[in-house]
Image: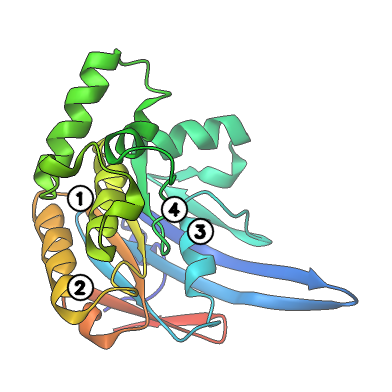
């Protein structure tokens, strides 16, 4: 298995070329990512596995266009996303990338339906169409009857499903998931993984950060991250 981006001149959906990320803390510099080179192909389900502090969540945020690397480049369909303006990058994210955050990040005073509709606010779609898209995706994740509930009226697994519904309501080709089963019991975690696998079978490229070897078993390939570097198996 090749483990460097762009080897053999094959064009990949995502290429990570020599990225690094440094944070300045007082008088010292911390290298969250030393150097990483990797690729992800269209339709893959890739796990990024590593211990807490290994750099995996930093890598995911960089892949999602949310965290400018200190060095190196990220190519999405050959487009260097960090050479775009912040507005262009925001447009790219809204069209191509859905994100499932580790702590759900649902807005507590909005209903389930309103939370799921948030990514549609900048699409220019009419309110009626936004409503239908959100209800359709809630039905897809098994929450059609919870549309008018508030997040704190749901279980952890249900909140995770809302977070997934919000991430996929725009039908983005790429889905980034940060520890999607980290706060769930094993049965609920398995249900969430089955849902992600189903989305992947339908064509979505999924990149999942996890520290759980069991979750990795559901993906087609695992990228291991350790001490700010990575390797693939």
Tell me the quarter of the picture where residue 97 sits.
Answer: top left
Q: Quadrant of residue 165?
A: top left
- Whether residue 46 appears in this view of the structure is yes
Q: As drawn, is 183 to the left or to the right of 218?
A: right
Residue at horizontal 54%, vertical 67%? 58
Q: Residue 173, how many percent across, how many down?
A: 26, 44
**Which one is earlier in the sequence, the residue at label 4 or at label 3?**
3
From the image, tell me which residue sits under label 3: 61
Closer to the camera, 144 or 91?
144
Vertical relation: 126 (above or below) 180: above
Residue at image mark 4:
105
Mark 4 and mark 3: span between their CA atoms? 15 Å
Q: Is residue 56 left or right of residue 174?
A: right
- Find residue 189 and name its label: 2
Q: CA distance from mark 2 to mark 1?
A: 20 Å
Considering only order in the chain, which callout, 3 or 1, is on the residue closer to the N terminus? 3
Q: Secondary structure at mark 3?
A: helix
Q: Is residue 44 left or right of residue 175?
A: left
Most foreground residue, 147 or 60: 147
**Spatial distance from mark 2 to mark 4, Cα to Cα?**
18 Å
CA distance separating discs 3 and 2: 22 Å
Task: Point out residue 9 in the picture as x, y percentages from the top left corner.
Answer: 35, 58
Q: At 37% from the left edge and 83% from the top edge, which residue is drawn?
A: 211
Residue under label 1, please give it: 204
Between disc 3 and disc 2, whose residue precedes? 3
Q: Is residue 226 above or below residue 61?
A: below
């Amino acid at each position: 298995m090749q483990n460097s981006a762009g080897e053999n001149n094959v064009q990949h959906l995502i290429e990570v070329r020599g990225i690094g990320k440094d944070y300045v803390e007082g008088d010292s510099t911390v290298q969250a990512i030393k150097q990483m080179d990797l690729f992800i192909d269209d339709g893959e389900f890739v796990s990024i596995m590593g211990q807490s502090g290994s750099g995996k969540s930093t890598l995911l945020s960089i892949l999602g266009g949310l965290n400018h690397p200190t060095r190196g480049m990220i190519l999405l369909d050959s487009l260097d996303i960090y050479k775009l303006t912040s507005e262009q990058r925001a447009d790219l994210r809204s069209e191509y990338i859905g994100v499932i955050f580790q702590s759900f990040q649902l807005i507590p005073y909005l209903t389930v339906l309103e939370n799921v509709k948030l990514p549609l606010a900048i699409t220019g779609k009419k309110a009626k169409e936004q409503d239908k898209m959100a209800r359709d995706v809630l039905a897809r994740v098994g929450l059609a009857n919870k549309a008018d509930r508030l997040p704190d009226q749901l279980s952890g697994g249900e909140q995770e499903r809302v977070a997934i519904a919000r991430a996929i309501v725009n039908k983005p080709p790429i889905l980034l998931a940060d520890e999607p089963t980290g706060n769930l019991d094993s049965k609920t975690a398995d249900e969430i993984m089955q849902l992600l696998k189903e989305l992947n079978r339908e064509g979505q490229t999924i990149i999942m950060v996890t520290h759980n070897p069991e979750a990795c078993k559901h993906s087609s390939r695992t990228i291991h991250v350790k001490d700010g570097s990575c390797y693939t198996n």
